[in-house]
Amino acid sequence: MSILSAQSKPLPPGPMQAKVKAACTQCHNASRITEQHLTKQEWSAQLDKMAALGAEIQDADRPAILTYLTKNFGPEKGSKTAAKKSTEETK
Ligand code: HEC
């Protein structure tokens, strides 16, 4: 039995949890997302990639989804990529 590999880590609660679950767990489970540590720019690129693959991300929801993903699955503290270019802010 391999329970660990079969289970996915749950998406953390928050206003966007249901939307991310609906939009992002049709093709793969949530662990594809919860195992990542990405910057906002990298998450934005992932959202574009997923949209190209067929994910339905409403324009109105995109900024909030991006914030949710970056907040919960942002770069790990102490990572070099997080420290560099921290002055470059994107909207
Ligand atoms: C239409 C199907 C589909 C939907 C919907 C979808 N994805 Fe994906 N996703 C994929 C496929 C296929 C891959 C694998 C792509 C690859 O390996 O190049 C993937 C891979 C990923 C990866 C990369 C994982 C890794 O191991 O590098 C992330 C992160 C991701 N998806 C996040 C999301 C998010 C966030 C959403 C919701 C906005 C989403 N996905 C919705 C099909 C989908």
Image (spheres, rainbow, N blue to C red):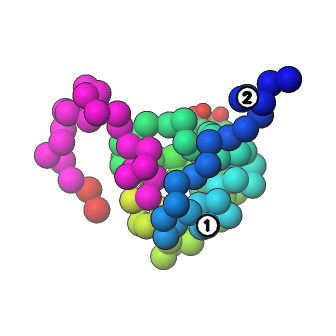
Ligand 1 contact, mark 2 (Cβ < 8 Å): no
In the picture as drawn, the residue positioned furthest to the left comes out as 87
Ligand 1 contact, mark 1 (Cβ < 8 Å): no
Q: Is residue 36 above or below residue 62?
A: above
Q: Residue at x 61, y 49 (%)?
A: 10
Residue 73 at x, y percent in the picture: 44, 44
Identify the residue under disc 1: 18
Mark 2 is on which residue type? Ser
Instruction: Tell me if residue 76 is in the magenta stretch.
Output: yes
Mark 1 is on which residue type? Ala
Point out which mark residue 9 bears. Answer: none
User: Residue 5 versus residue 39: which sits nearer the camera?
Assistant: 5
Identify the residue under disc 2: 5
User: Residue 5 versus residue 21: which sits nearer the camera?
Assistant: 5
In the image: residue 88, left or right of residue 17? left
Question: Ligand 1 appears in which quadrant?
Answer: top right
In the image: residue 74, left or right of residue 1? left
Residue 66 at x, y percent in the picture: 43, 58
Q: Residue at x 50, y 37 (%)?
A: 36
Q: Residue at x 19, y 33 (%)?
A: 84
Q: Secondary structure at mark 1?
A: helix
In the picture as drawn, the residue positioned furthest to the bottom comes out as 60
First in sequence: mark 1 vs mark 2: 2
Residue 53 visible here: no
Q: Is residue 35 above or below residue 22?
A: above
User: Residue 81 versus residue 14: which sits nearer the camera?
Assistant: 14
Residue 85 at x, y percent in the picture: 18, 38
In the image: residue 10, left or right of residue 81? right
- Give the magenta part as a residue range: 68-89
Q: Residue at x 55, y 42 (%)?
A: 34
Residue 7 visible here: yes
Badge 2, how many Cα within 10 Å: few under 14, some, many 20+?
Answer: few
